[in-house]
Every structure is written in C-alpha cells, then in structure tokens.
Image: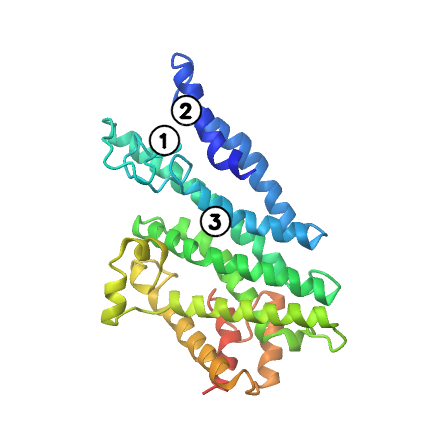
Amino acid sequence: VVEVSAHTGPSTARALASSYPQNYTIEMCVDEIYTRINSELILPVILESAQSDTIPAKRSASLALFHTLHSEWCKAGSYLDGSTSAPSLAGPYGPGISPGSGHVSAPPFNPAEGQRRNQIKSARRAELLRRWVQSAIPNLTPGTFTNATLDASAAGRGVLSASAALKPCLRYMAERIGSADDAGALRLFLPVMRMIEGVLGRIFLERTRGGESSSMDKKGQVEGDALRSSCIKFLEIVVLCFSKKELPFQAASRMKKDNVANDFSLEDLPPGHPIITRESLEEIGDYAFSTLRGLVLLGGQAAIDPNLLLAAAASSSSGSNFMGGSNPFTPILDILKPAALAFL
C-alpha cells in the first residue's frame, strides 16, 4: 500500500504522460492517479480502519501507516517531494533529486505553473495531515473498548500517532499563516487542538472519568503504564513546540538544516492570525512546562482538587468549557491549569 501510494503511482503517471504526450499531460495523469488511488481509496480506508476497527491490532497498524505515508510522500519523486524546490524536477511531476546525486540542472519552467503545482502540493499535504489527526482522536476517547486493557492499548497507539503528527501539523499551519491563508491554517488547527485535549485528558482526567479500574489485570497495568509514559512524552513535545528558543546554543543548533526542517517553536509561527497567536500557544506551553516539571520532580504524587478535575472532565466530554468561554484553547487550559497549580 505504501509503495503504490507514494512511489508507484507518481512513477506510473510520469511514464504514461511521456508515452502518450499527444493525449495526456503530466498534470492530468498525476491528478487522476492521485484522486483514484489516494483520495478515493487508500486514505479513506486507512482512516476508517484507524477510527472504527474492532481489532486493536488493525487500528494500531492503520495509525502507524499515516506516519509512514507522510515520510514516504516527502521522498524524492513523491507527492510531497522535499528534495528540490525546482517545479520541473520536484515530484510527483519529476523524479526529484536523490541523495548523493550532486548538482542537477532543472529545465526552465513557467512560474505560474510552478505556483499552481505548489498550491496542489499544499492541498495534498493538508489532506494527509488532517486525516492523520482525525485518525488519532477517536482512539483517545475513553471507552473506545469496553475492556480496560484493550482501551489502554488503543489509547497508547493514538498518543504515539499524535506525538508524530504534532510537529508536521504545526509547521504546515505556520506555512499557511505565512501565505495569508488563515482559513487553511484554522481547518487543521481545530482538530489538532482536539487531539491535544484528548491526550491530556487521558493522563489527567482518567480517574474522574472512571477510566482506571482497580480490577485491571497485570497486562492491563502494563498497558496503563505505557499509556502514561506516552502521554508524558507528548506533554514534553507540547512544551518544546509551544515555547521560545532563545538560548545561544539552541539558536546555533537551529541553524542546522535538519533541525530547522524537523523542529518547531514559537519563533516559527508568523504573526497576524486572529486566533492562532504566539501568546495563546505560549500560555499552553507555560502550564504544560509547570505540569511536566511537577510530574518529573514529584512523581505525580501531588493531589489535584477533584472538583476542578470533575468540572474539566465534564466540559471535555460535552465539548464546552467550564469557564464559559468559546476560545479553542480553553478546554486544554482547563485540563492543564489544575494540574500545573497543584505542582507549584
């Protein structure tokens, strides 16, 4: 599936266009193959399996497949080719530049057509990221499986998928804001916020929701420990992404190409969006850091006011927030604030 989706499809389109240039253009072949294979078949089937399959192993495989697809689509010659910025060489319309090939001269190309191809590439990237996030959210919902062990296992895979998807989603939203596409950034931002809320709810609201069972067997306790470990790792990623990097040694490390391409911090978020602002994300990062520091130093033994947790759990399950606001950040803050204040 991965090979057909990421590599065989684009190469087939290029071969078809070169064999029958009088009948088909490269754009026609790529669009047709992408629509039939990816948009209408592979991505919807994987999403449905990740969201609703009754076998946890199939859900886990489907969740991991989104991460694999994203990695493969970014390789040379595929739909999100990051090997070159030349429109005439970049995939899926060109073979891309493989590692170690050295300098490759790109044929001349119409700038307007190059811009159109970049827009299509951005739309395909948004489709993959949106489905990736949507696949993780149902697995983070308590009670996905009636068996506590299976529920913890599915949630753990959902947290791992969310951890892998967070940075690519934030980078895409930053690109959209930088291109003055506020609506495009918001379409992905709202599911990402629900995903973050779901992960934080699994670690801080389980007891108030009745998610931790005293009768859980040994295997279930192992799955529960693995889930908590994955949630804490996700919390660390939130802290890193929703904070500034101002220390000299950190600034120097960000000069490296690999770090810049694979990392994200508040400096990467352009200003100007009415909702997605640095100040709002930094507030989440501050509370997340206080919570993470408390979990590390105190081992999570500090008592959190149960009334606050019950209110946060109720607001999370109803889709509203107990502080009466409509800000998409508020449900996340409703979970983080009681936990962060407990560790101060």
Say which amino acid is labelled 1.
Answer: Pro
**Residue 247 visible from this viewpoint:** yes
Q: Amino acid at mark 2?
A: Arg
Residue at 66% across / 49% down in the picture?
A: 58
Residue that label 3 marks: 129
* Left/right of residue 102 with respect to residue 227 in the rendered view: left
Q: Quadrant of residue 209?
A: bottom right
Q: Are the two marked residues, 1 and 2, in contact with CB atoms closer than 8 angstroms?
A: yes
Q: CA distance from mark 1 to mark 2?
A: 9 Å
User: Closer to the N terminus: mark 3 or mark 2?
Assistant: 2
Residue in the image at 58% along x and 72% along y: 203
Query: Which label sits in the foreground, 1 or 3?
Result: 1
Q: State the image coordinates of residue 92 (x, y, percent, origin top left).
A: 40, 32
Task: For the C terminus, give its image quadrant.
Answer: bottom left
- Residue 198 position, x and y percent, is 56, 65
Check whether the beta carbons of the residues at disc 1 and disc 3 lie within 8 A of each other.
no
Can see residue 340? no
Instruction: Name the residue located 45 percent from the left edge and 74 percent from the top edge.
Output: 288
Which of 44/178 is in front? 44
- Foreground tag (3 vs 2): 2
* Mark toward the start of the polypeptide (1 vs 2): 2
The residue type indicated by label 3 comes to Leu
Secondary structure state at the residue bearing disc 1: loop
Residue indicated by mark 2: 14
Quadrant in the picture for residue 114: top left
Question: Tag 2's secondary structure?
Answer: helix
SS under mark 3: helix
On residue 153, the disc is none
Residue at which label 1 appears: 95
Local packing at callout 3 (Cα closer than 10 Å; few below 14, some 14-19, many 20+) is: many
Q: Look at 62% across and 66% down and name the residue there.
A: 318
